[in-house]
Amino acid sequence: MAARHALRILVLKGGDSSEREVSLSSARRVAEALASRGHQVTEADPAGDPLAVLPAARAADVVWMALHGGTGEDGTIQALFDLAGVRYTGSGHLASALAMDKDLSKHLFRAAGVPTADWWMARAGGGEEWRTPEYAARAAAALGLPIVVKPSKQGSTVGLSIVKATQSLGPAVEEAFRHDDEVMLEAFVPGRELTVGVLGQWMMPVGEIIPKREIYDYECKYTPGMAEELFPAPIDAAVRDEAQRLTRLAYEALKLRGCARIDFRLHPDGGLYCLEANTLPGMTGTSLVPQAAQADGVGFPELCERIALDALGSLRENA
């Protein structure tokens, strides 16, 4: 799937989220890859003033969204580009917002028949009952222990804790509130971690992540050697097919488009539980989607080009 002519591509990078450094790393690799395919590549950083990137965005054929987290992934900049008539990679503003909000995502997953772990929500301004021993005891009775505590609208496991004792719940929720005004308390699903990349109709091979720690946290994701990633995953064909089927259901339930990644836990009993959807997956040297594509015979430069071309095609169809 090579471009017929050189495209003018603006790679959007950085931003002001907690994942800024990851974004800069992704953007650097993406820009080099696209240039190697013969495209005219420029870069811009919307940190501080997203409106300042509009002239460059309007001059490009397509904006390659290498932003992660914050306003770059929650639909804010996507809405700005929609208003300005700018073509960009990844999902639209509504789908981006839905995927970023883990609470809304889980409601939509369940409505679509995608299994996901039970959860509670704590919200700022709703009192601080979560600080009490009674709240912790009720949460443990309802969700079991351990409980995964995380900000509802953050990525890369920022602010995430695994609570194994009720007395640790309050401090974990307090830490998560440092990153968001809503905090999710989620039942911990034991088992293997699987991930599935998708680009439009292209379903990539299922991968398995084996972190050096109990959970695939920020350090494991972005530090070489802190996790082992296997593509394709050493799983039965039935599990592979089910993971890909549920990925398609989750992708459509959130109205995603372009490149996305859906993460799962494979319970020891064989059940799959959807963890979350990522609308702007990382493109760093340790990121998962490039590894999945490579396992399907698609190198990184071609993957980046396919993502750009998909954005141009899908937006023309929806114009």
Image: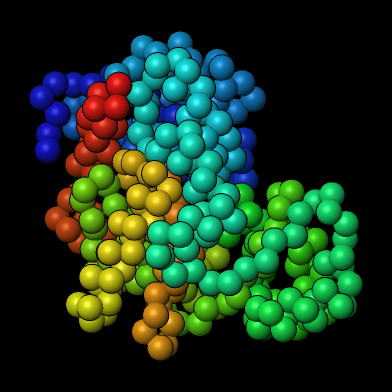
| Residue 4 higher or lower than 72, as above or below | above
- The quarter of the picture where the N terminus appears is top left
**Which one is in front, 179 or 247?**
247
Q: Is residue 10 left or right of residue 183?
A: left
Q: How many marks?
A: 0
Which colouring convention does the figure follow?
rainbow
Across and down, in percent, residue 202 comes to: 21, 51
**Which one is in front, 125 or 192?**
125
For the point 58% across and 77% down, which residue is it? 188
Across and down, in percent, residue 219 comes to: 55, 63
- The quarter of the picture where the C terminus appears is top left
Across and down, in percent, residue 223 comes to: 49, 61
For the point 31% across and 68% down, which residue is it? 243
The quarter holding residue 312 reads top left
The outermost residue toward the bottom is: 269
**Which one is in front, 276 or 40?**
276
Residue 35 visible somewhere in the drawing = no
Residue 142 visible somewhere in the drawing = yes
The quarter holding residue 147 reads bottom right
For the point 58% across and 72% down, which residue is it? 118
| Residue 252 higher or lower than 162, as above or below | above
Q: Is residue 33 left or right of residue 149?
A: left
Across and down, in percent, residue 85 comes to: 40, 16
The quarter holding residue 41 reads top left
Q: Is residue 275 left or right of residue 309?
A: right
For the point 40% across and 38% down, which residue is it? 91
Q: Is residue 163 left or right of residue 96?
A: right
